[in-house]
Amino acid sequence: MKSEMIITIGDGRKVDAEFNGFTIHTDQSVHAGGEGSAPEPFTLFLASIGTCAGIYVSSFCKSRGIPVDGIRLVQSHFTGESGRGIGKIEITIELPPDFPEKYKDAVINAANLCAVKKHILNPPEFVVKTVTK
C-alpha cells in the first residue's frame, strides 16, 4: 500500500506538505534565512513525538473515565555527547494530585505506545530519487 504526501517549495525558505486534505506550512527562522512565519521542519518532527504520546495518554484516561484536565506532557531535549544534535528526549507526564495512583505506571506505558516513537526506534528505509516530468 502506498500513500503520498506532496511537498512544494515556496518563496524564501518556505516548504509546505499536503497530505489527507491538510497543508502543513514550514519556514526557517530569521536566523536561518527564513521569515519565521511557520515552524521549522525539525520543530514539527519534535512536536510529533510529544503530541503522539499525548494522544495515547488522552485515550488511556478517557477510556477509564479519568479527566484529562490538569494533565500536561513536558518534552525535554538533551544535547548529544558530541555537543550536537539531540542525544536524549525525555517526556514528563504531569498529573494532577487526584490522579489515581494505580494508573501512574500504566499511563507511562500508554505514552510509550506512540507510533512516532516506534518508527524512530525501528526506522523505515529511506530512498531519495529524481524523476524528470
Image (spheres, rainbow, N blue to C red):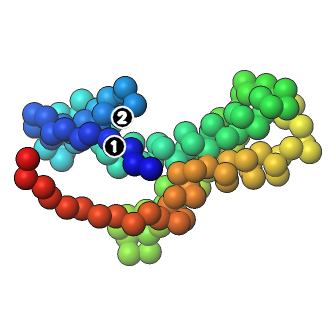
Q: CA distance from mark 1 to mark 2?
A: 7 Å
- On screen, residue 47 versus residue 5, left or right, reads right
Q: Residues within 10 Å of mark 1 (few under 14, many from 20)?
A: few
Where residue 32 sits in the image (x, y, percent)? 18, 47
Where residue 24 sits in the image (x, y, percent)? 33, 32
Q: Residue at x 39, y 44 (%)?
A: 3
Q: Of 4 and 33, which appears nearest the observer?
A: 4
Counting every numbered tag in the picture gives 2
Task: Residue 76: tell me if it is visible.
Answer: no
Q: Earlier in the sequence, mark 1 or mark 2?
A: 1
Instruction: Tell me the element at label 1.
Output: loop
Give above or below for 18 relative to 127: above
- Tag 1: residue type? Glu
Give above or below for 21 relative to 59: above
Q: Which residue is mark 2?
A: 19
- Tag 2: residue type? Phe
Task: Residue 80: tell me if it is visible.
Answer: yes
Labelled pair 1, 2 in contact (Cβ < 8 Å)? yes
Q: Which mark is residue 48?
A: none
Where residue 108 sits in the image (x, y, percent)? 74, 50
- On screen, residue 5 versus residue 1, left or right, reads left
Going by the picture, which residue comes out furthest to the left? 132
Q: Residues within 10 Å of mark 2 (few under 14, many from 20)?
A: few
Q: Which mark is residue 4?
A: 1
Going by the picture, which residue comes out furthest to the bottom? 82
Where residue 69 sits in the image (x, y, percent)? 72, 24
- On screen, residue 16 versus residue 71, left or right, reads left
Instruction: Tell me the element at label 2.
Output: strand
Instruction: Give the image quarter of residue 56.
Output: top right
Q: Residue at x 40, y 48 (%)?
A: 2
